[in-house]
Image (cartoon, rainbow, N blue to C red):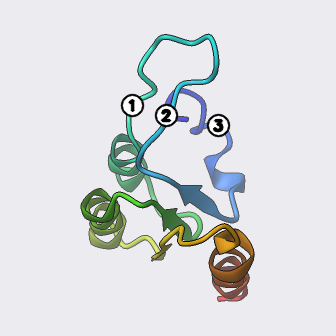
Amino acid sequence: MIAEVLPFLDQACLISLDHDLNPQPGITVDPGTGLEVAEFLAKQSPVCPVLIHSTNYEKAWSMHNEFRFANWQVDRVGPISDDWIEKLWLPKVKTLLKG
């Protein structure tokens, strides 16, 4: 994301980030972490809300603070249970996009 986001960032209406990133099948390069993405984005001018979703509690708050201290609108949800996307993530997205 860090390598490709800048040309498209001003068109974003929402960014949703996890902390623990896994490489795609067949890829052996470490994809980094969501905190690295948060640190990079926080250096840019705020353009849209950010929603953090991660089971990594401490790192999710570190990501949250990166955005908060840079004046981005940021919130977080915890991926809890199998239907967390429908019950937690989606309602929060709808709220953020209305704001």
Sequence-earlier tag: 1 or 2 = 2
Q: Secondary structure at mark 3?
A: loop
**Whole-Å distance between the Cαs marked 3 and 1?**
21 Å
Please identify the quadrant where the N terminus is shown.
top right
Mark 3 is surrounded, within 10 Å at the Cα level, by few (under 14), some (14 to 19) or many (20 or more) other residues, namely: few
Between disc 3 and disc 2, whose residue precedes?
2
Q: Nearer the viewer, residue 13 or 75?
A: 75
Q: Give the x, y percent position of residue 35.
A: 34, 48
Question: Which element is circle 2 on?
Answer: loop
**Residue that mark 3 sits on:** 7
The residue type indicated by label 2 comes to Ile
Residue 84, picture quadrant: bottom right
Q: What's the distance in space between the residues labelled 3 and 2, CA to CA? A: 11 Å
Note whether 61 is above or below 98 in the view shown.
above
Q: Is residue 37 above or below residue 12?
A: above
Question: Sequence order check: which comes first, mark 3 or mark 1?
Answer: 3
Give the number of the disc on residue 32. 1
Q: Nearer the viewer, residue 27 or 12?
A: 27
Callout in the foreground (1, 2): 1
Q: Position of residue 8 (x, y in %)?
A: 68, 43
Instruction: Please name the residue that numbered disc 2 is placed on.
Output: 2
Q: Position of residue 56 (x, y in %)?
A: 34, 57
Q: Nearer the viewer, residue 23 or 75?
A: 23
Determine contact: label 1, label 2, CB under 8 Å.
yes
| Circle 1: residue type | Gly
Which type of secondary structure does the marked residue at label 1 adopt?
loop
Q: Residue at x 53, y 25 (%)?
A: 23
